[in-house]
Each structure stands twice: as structure tokens, then as C-alpha cells.
Image: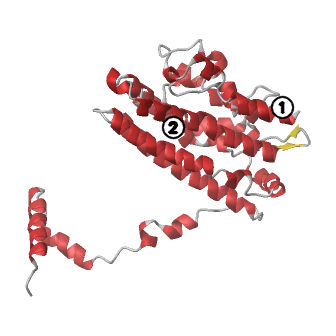
């Protein structure tokens, strides 16, 4: 049988490729001959994926709750994937930075737009019952979200707002991490003690968080932007994309959680304790902690009004 020219050309190129790497083309062709065709369900491990929604109660809406959180964590994985490409790029340009930020903002926009699944997509009475079976687990314990923050900005920008003026990059990473803002959300307001939710989270992930903080010291997204040549740093598309990322993560994403908290945890002007005991009213409002990854991109007025209008509206409506 005659071998068509375009097939013969490819075989010669393959032979050259494997020869250069010390491999035998014939062995690889045998593997191709015996291999079975790849199916979609095998490629994405569909059966395994669909087996992971293991609920703890018989309430139907818990399936929505766990599935949405798993989807969120998959998007977080994609976000970290893009962040690392920025951080690890030694010849970073504004155009490459913008390309990755477009993806990052797209992922967060999808998450923000889809949060109605959480806010409106479950029966409130079901939620208030099945969540009790989840104690002390909480979305507060999303390690990937904390990693997104660590890849985005130095620890001094994540120190709780009341203490931030007392810290700088001169402090040790350990000292900065002790004052990171989200830890305040895991403190019992009555006793002042750490909740079990926070204790579990710290025990499991503190070593990993510290490894990441040391790995990216001086080269977070914040540092990568600040170290760009002035001409690149002045790129308006880049600056706007960074500002949008800041708002998406530190305002819009939190506001969606505030909306869910007000729907499910407020009743007759009384507040129901959040899963895991996190004090969400002190922790979630963006105007309270004023976390920004890129402080130099915001005016003093913009920073002072960080998420303020929405939060004021929500708390006034509660009175």
C-alpha cells in the first residue's frame, strides 16, 4: 500500500524527533496502534467527578450547596494557574499581563454572576437545617482563595485594617501573617478566642501559606506591576485591568457573600450564627477591612469609600 506524501512527511518528522531524544519511533507507533480511542468521559474523569457530591443530609438543596462550592474551587484553581504564569514570567510585558488579567477577571465575573445560585437558588428553611450538619466547616476555610490573595499582593497589604499602619515589608512574614485580616473573622466575639473553624484551618494550611508567602516574596502580582518599566507600567489597559481585578476580588465577590449571608442568616432583625461561628458582619464587608491588592492605583477618596455605599445600604435596611 502506498503511503501518501503528507503521511510520509509526518513519519519522517516523528522519526527525527524521537531520534534526537534517544527514543525509538517504532515503540511509540506500537503504543499508538494498541491504544484505545480516548472518550470524553474518560478524559475529564466524569464518573469520578460526578461521584464527589457527597451530601451530609437528606435535604435536596444541599446538593446545590456542595456542587456550587466545588465549581467555585475549580475556578479558583484556574485563577491560581493564571496568577502563577504572571509571577513566573521573567520577561513580563504589559500585553502579557493584560492577557492574563482578562482571563482572571473573566473567571471572577463568571463566579460573581453565578452567585445567584447561592443567593436565590436554595430554600432558606432547608439551608438553615442542613448547614447545622456541616459544623464547624465553613467557606471561610477556602485555602485556594487565601492563596489567590498571597499570589496577588504582599502580606502587609492583607493585615487587618486597624493594624495595617503599624506594619510594613520590613516586618517578618510570620509577624505579618499573624495579623492577616481574615483571622479576625474566626474569632468568637463573646470570648475573644479562636473558633474551631479557624483552629482547624490554621493547623492544616499555615505551613503551606507560609511556604507560598516565602516563594513569592518580592514577586507577587503587585511587585510584578511595580517593577515594570515606567512606559509599561503606565499602560492604561493594564492599570484598568488591575483595578478591575482588585474590585472583583475585594469588593464584588465579598458583596455576593454578603447578599447570601443577609438572605440566609438574618431573620426578623436577628442574626443567626454563621456556619463555623465566623463573625461575618465584621469579616465580609469590604468597607471594614479595605483590602486592596494594588493600593497605588486608587485615590485616597476611592480607598476611603471602598465598598461603602453597598454596605451602608444593607445595614440601614436591617434597622
**Left or right of 32 in this view: 310:** right
The x, y position of residue 179, in whole percent, is 61, 22
* Tag 2 residue: 147
Q: Please tell me whether residue 205 is drawn above or below residue 113 in the rendered image.
A: above
In terms of secondary structure, where does tag 1 sit?
helix
Examine the image and state in which quarter residue 194 appears: top right
Against 135, residue 161 (above or below) is above
Report whether 39 appears left or right of 91: right
Does residue 103 show up?
yes
Q: Residue at x 66, y 25 (%)?
A: 289
In this rendered view, identify the residue nearer to me: 268 or 163. 268
Which picture quadrant has residue 59? bottom right
Position of 195 with respect to 216 (left or right) is right
Residue occupied by mark 1: 316
Residue visible at 52% across and 36% down in the picture: 245
Residue 279 seen anywhere in this rendered image of the structure? no
Picture quarter with the C terminus: top right
Give the class, few, some or many, for how many residues have Cα within 10 Å of label 1's Cα (few <14, many ≥20). Answer: few
Viewer-side residue, 107 vs 181:
107
| Residue 92 in picture, x, y percent from top left | 31, 33
The residue at the far bottom in this view is: 1
**Quick check: 184 left or right of 126?**
left
> Would you call the spot at circle 2 few (<14 residues within 10 Å), some (14-19), or many (20 or more)?
some
Say which label, 1 or 2, has the lower sequence index: 2
**In x, y percent, where is residue 240?**
48, 32
At mark 2, the secondary structure is helix
Q: Which mark is residue 225?
A: none
Q: Are marks 1 and 2 in contact (CB under 8 Å)?
A: no
Coordinates of residue 197 in the picture (x, y in percent): 69, 39
Q: How is the image coloured?
A: secondary structure
Amino acid at each position: 500500500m502506498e503511503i501518501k506524501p503528507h503521511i510520509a512527511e509526518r513519519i519522517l518528522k516523528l522519526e527525527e524527533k524521537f531520534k534526537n531524544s534517544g527514543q525509538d519511533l517504532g515503540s511509540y507507533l506500537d503504543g499508538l496502534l494498541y491504544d484505545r480511542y480516548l472518550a470524553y468521559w474518560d478524559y475529564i474523569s466524569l464518573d469520578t467527578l460526578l461521584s464527589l457530591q457527597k451530601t451530609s443530609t437528606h435535604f435536596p438543596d444541599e446538593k446545590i450547596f456542595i456542587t456550587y462550592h466545588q465549581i467555585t474551587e475549580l475556578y479558583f484553581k484556574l485563577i491560581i494557574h493564571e496568577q502563577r504564569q504572571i509571577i513566573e514570567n521573567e520577561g513580563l510585558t504589559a500585553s502579557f499581563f493584560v492577557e492574563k488579567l482578562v482571563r482572571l477577571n473573566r473567571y471572577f465575573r463568571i463566579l460573581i454572576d453565578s452567585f445567584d445560585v447561592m443567593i436565590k437558588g436554595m430554600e432558606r428553611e432547608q439551608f438553615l437545617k442542613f448547614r447545622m450538619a456541616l459544623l464547624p466547616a465553613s467557606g471561610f476555610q477556602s485555602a485556594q482563595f487565601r492563596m489567590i490573595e498571597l499570589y496577588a499582593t504582599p502580606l502587609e497589604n492583607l493585615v487587618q485594617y486597624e493594624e495595617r499602619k503599624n506594619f510594613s515589608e520590613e516586618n517578618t512574614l510570620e509577624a505579618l501573617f499573624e495579623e492577616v485580616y481574615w483571622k479576625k473573622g474566626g474569632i468568637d466575639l463573646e470570648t475573644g478566642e479562636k473558633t474551631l473553624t479557624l483552629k482547624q484551618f490554621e493547623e492544616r494550611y499555615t505551613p503551606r501559606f507560609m511556604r507560598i508567602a516565602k516563594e513569592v516574596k518580592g514577586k507577587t502580582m503587585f511587585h510584578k506591576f511595580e517593577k515594570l518599566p515606567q512606559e509599561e507600567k503606565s499602560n492604561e489597559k493594564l492599570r484598568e485591568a488591575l483595578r478591575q481585578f482588585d474590585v472583583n476580588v475585594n469588593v464584588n465577590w465579598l458583596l455576593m457573600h454578603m447578599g447570601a449571608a443577609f438572605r440566609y442568616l438574618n431573620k426578623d432583625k436577628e442574626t443567626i450564627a454563621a456556619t463555623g461561628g465566623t463573625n461575618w458582619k465584621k469579616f465580609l464587608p469590604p468597607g471594614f477591612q479595605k483590602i486592596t491588592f494594588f493600593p497605588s492605583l486608587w485615590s485616597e477618596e476611592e480607598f476611603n469609600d471602598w465598598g461603602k455605599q453597598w454596605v451602608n445600604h444593607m445595614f440601614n435596611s436591617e434597622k
